[in-house]
Amino acid sequence: RLEDPLMGASLTFLTSRSRLAAWPCVALMGWMAVCPAWAGDRLLGTSGVSQIEGAAGGGLTPWAVIGGNGSSDQVGASAYATHIRTQGKFNLNIQGVAVGVKNRVEVSMARWSFKFSDTVPGKSAQMNVLGAKVRVLGDAVYDQDMWWPQVSVGFQHKHNEDFKLVPTLLGATRGSDTDWYVAATKVWLGAAWGRNVLGNLTLRATRANQFGILGFGGDLGNRHQLMPEASLAVLVRDDLAVGAEWRAKPDRLSAFKEENAWDAFVAWFPHRNLSLTAAWLELGNIADKPSQRSLYLSAQVGF
């Protein structure tokens, strides 16, 4: 079941700290509802979907593109909800928003709620993610006569509200941390039998355990580690994209071996303001459960 990211009811049970962290998210949603200047001049699908930590991109990895449908003189925005449930009954629900300004700057927020299944019965972890991204070079779509891609730099600051529960027991050293990344994205128009092709490479500096759900750092290392991420997608129709992603993750806890993640996805854009994504997601080991995999479902509205 996908939760509606616009429903205030999902904020009812937040702690005072998470309420403070979440109020800008609510403010952005309100702004989206009343702002008359939304536009949609970009090619359909080229702004990606909402990545699990809130940035515009694929489901697993941020791309260099800026969120929303706004062009270089417009403001765009998006809101999304994502649901993941592994066969080991780990359950993750995510809601978030992103605002893109003049196809140059993006600000995003996401709220994670993760249930530990029978590994820690009845317990869950909440995580807030605040991100920002700046385009520093090129245009992924319109620089067709140039070899270089669109390049953006960004960060994602994560705060695990339940760090003292499971992460501490496993040896994680901190409950908050910041990932830094640089992403390069290129769209080749008509490159595959007349179909548009998108490629992305991202390099992330991180020490997150399971994206941050199990804290940051650990007994095997406490420094940021450079980890690569990659995406490849083909627009088989103007409104339908298929592709795959891969994301490397650091292995900082001796309690279990963390493995890389990958997915194969289908993204459908039935309307310029709506996208629906389904993916088969392979996550590897999570805590005490090996070979975790899941159907990934995500819905996004954008302007």
Image (cartoon, rainbow, N blue to C red):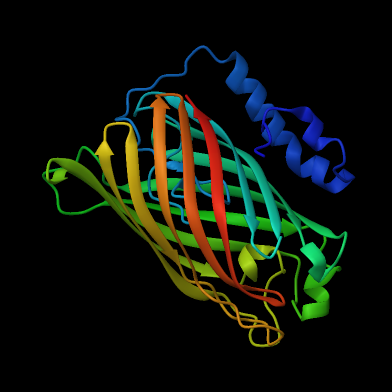
- To which quarter of the image does residue 88 belong? bottom right
- To which quarter of the image does residue 162 belong? bottom right
Relative to 137, 252 lies left or right: right
Relative to 45, 263 lies left or right: right
Looking at the image, residue 237 lies above or below residue 270: below
Say which of 202 and 180 sits in front: 202
Looking at the image, residue 238 lies above or below residue 34: below
Q: Is residue 161 visible?
A: no
Q: Position of residue 99 (x, y in %)?
A: 53, 33
Say which of 302 and 91 sits in front: 91
Relative to 286, 76 lies left or right: left
Q: Position of residue 212 (x, y in %)?
A: 67, 64
- To which quarter of the image does residue 74 belong? top left
Say which of 217 and 195 sits in front: 195
On-image quarter of the N terminus:
top right
Residue at the image position 85 percent from the left and 43 percent from the top: 14
Residue at the image position 86 percent from the left and 60 percent from the top: 123
Q: Is residue 175 visible?
A: yes
How many numbered callouts? 0
Relative to 50, 190 lies left or right: left
Looking at the image, residue 132 lies above or below residue 181: above
Residue at the image position 47 percent from the left and 51 percent from the top: 279
Q: Position of residue 203 (x, y in %)?
A: 42, 66
Q: Position of residue 188 (x, y in %)?
A: 19, 46
